[in-house]
Amino acid sequence: MTPLLSVNNLAVKFNSDESEVIAVDGINFEINKGEVLALVGESGSGKSVSALSTLSLLPNNADISGSIKLQGKELVGISHNELKSVRGSEVSFIFQEPMTSLNPLHTIEKQLREAVELHSAAHFSSITEYIVELLTRVGIDSPRQRLGAYPHQLSGGQRQRVMIAMALANNPKILIADEPTTALDVTIEAQILDLLVELKKNTEMGILFITHDLGLVKRLANRVCVMKNGKIVEHGLVSAVFEKPCHEYTRKLLFANTSVSPDPVGEKAAIVAEVSSLKVWFPIQRGLLKRTVGFVKAVNDANLTVREGETIGVVGESGSGKSTLALALMRLIKYEGSVYFNDQNLSDFSLKELRKLRKDIQIVFQDPYGSLSPRMTCEQIILEGVKVHFSSPLKDTENLVSEAMLEVGLDPKTRHRYPHEFSGGQRQRIAIARAMALKPKLVVLDEPTSALDRTVQVQIVELLKFLQKKHKMAYIFISHDLKVIRSMSHRIIVMKDGNIVEAGDAKQIYNNPQNSYTKSLLQSVN
């Protein structure tokens, strides 16, 4: 039987003026009809590069060799027009970072319509109804109302779901899913997995599933390939690899785990930030005169305090208001209510005064690619805040950068590379290094480990705990990963539809949740 996708001796090199980087080093794998093959490994191991090479989606400095065959048809070296007929129709891609994949100037309906009209328009009497059906399948609430929305008006998880809908629009033979659940909360993640399982059962679609989450691999995949430094170090049936891993690196991935709970907070710890009656409502405007006909209640009457050395975990599904709460706390968006930092009301600060305060309040955004300047090197990014907030020139910036990079698991030798030369997980580590370089008093962490493999998650969590203990930093930690939340948080607030539905001690909420929504969140990871 001819496999749907066959990859033989695939090698990918990136050439630059200074050096040659081998990203993929002679790998082999195949995917059969109705089969899910998982690619796992740490950030920078070559997983995404291997996937992107199948459709020649790599930059011009990439040198691809070897063979990639789709049902016996060679894809390496074919013309651009031939590739166009394959992309989106026979092979679809779900990208890791939806904000960089969706057009910010087009509505969701227009982008999905383009995908359908390009390959499958003749099959549908009403494309709009088909689009609504697609959005429903991937768990978008009120899909018909979302048709006219732009990407920036959706949460990170909602944008990812739109990407998944776009990939499924033309019923491809091969679906390549590169971290498809990274930005999704656990309830929607379960829905997406169920959807993929259904596709696997009811169609002959082959799925290449790239993920950091080994739990997802166990639930979805038939076979697994473990990658490290551009090579496949172990492959086989999921059951066999998980039960009896042969390679030392596989064992390391499987048994990596974060500590159960954070260090206790001192009894006399001072309050760093306090939020009272915080409200963020976005007006809904319609008609030529842009009259306000209602409001999107993104955050409604939120209250919280965070002390020195304390972590407040914020959980909830995509669109619940978590990131909006974070932005308001940073005074990056308008809000009603009060936000106090070190007993000072942020509303009383001018923009100039607020700028000086930024060194003490830092944020790590969910989308590392969108928050890093593509024109700045890793070194320049890390030093950006340091140069802004410290007038005296630093004598040893080289050591500062090296130390910051080593702390987050990056090789200082890569300091002169640009963001696009790093993997998604590596870019997130750069963002964390930039925030921590200033040793702030309060750090808002918006999904800081979402793009990281489990081994690096452990490193980052332990690093964050170490820095917190050393510098008595306070964290607002937003995450979909309830395991990470549990290991980091002293107290937890649970958000739904802009409201805090439950708040309290982390152990208490995990062991004895009171709200039905909290119970459903916790059940989804059990």
Image (spheres, rainbow, N blue to C red):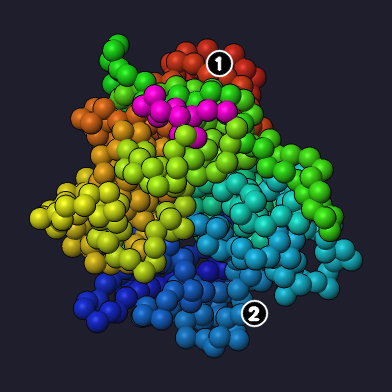
Give the residue type that dot 1 points to.
Pro
Image: 21 above or below 171: below
Q: Residue at x 37, y 31 (%)?
A: 475
Q: Which residue range is magenta in the image?
A: 337-347
Placement of the N terminus among the 4 image quadrants: bottom right
Judging depth in this view, the residue of 463 and 193 nearest the camera is 463
Q: Residue at x 47, y 13 (%)?
A: 508
Question: Is 343 a magenta residue?
Answer: yes
* Vertical position of residue 424 compared to residue 330: above or below: below
Q: How many numbered marks appear?
A: 2
Image coordinates of residue 132 in percent, x first then y, are: 79, 53
Left or right: 191 in relation to 179: right
Question: Dot 1, crowdedness within 10 Å: few (<14), some or many (≥20)?
Answer: some
Asked where in the image residue 484 lies, by quadrant, the reply is top left
Q: Mark 1 highlights which residue? A: 513
Majority secondary structure of magenta residues = strand
* Above or below for 116 versus 494: below
Residue 264 - label: none
> Could you give the CA–CA distance between mark 1 and mark 2, rounded to whole angstroms?
51 Å
Residue 464, quarter of picture: top left
Report whether residue 161 is seen: no
x, y (%) of residue 164? 63, 55
Residue positioned 83% across, 69% down in the render: 123
* Res. 2 in view: yes
Q: Classify mark 2: helix, strand or loop.
A: helix
Instruction: Kindly identify which numbered label has been placed on residue 85.
Output: 2
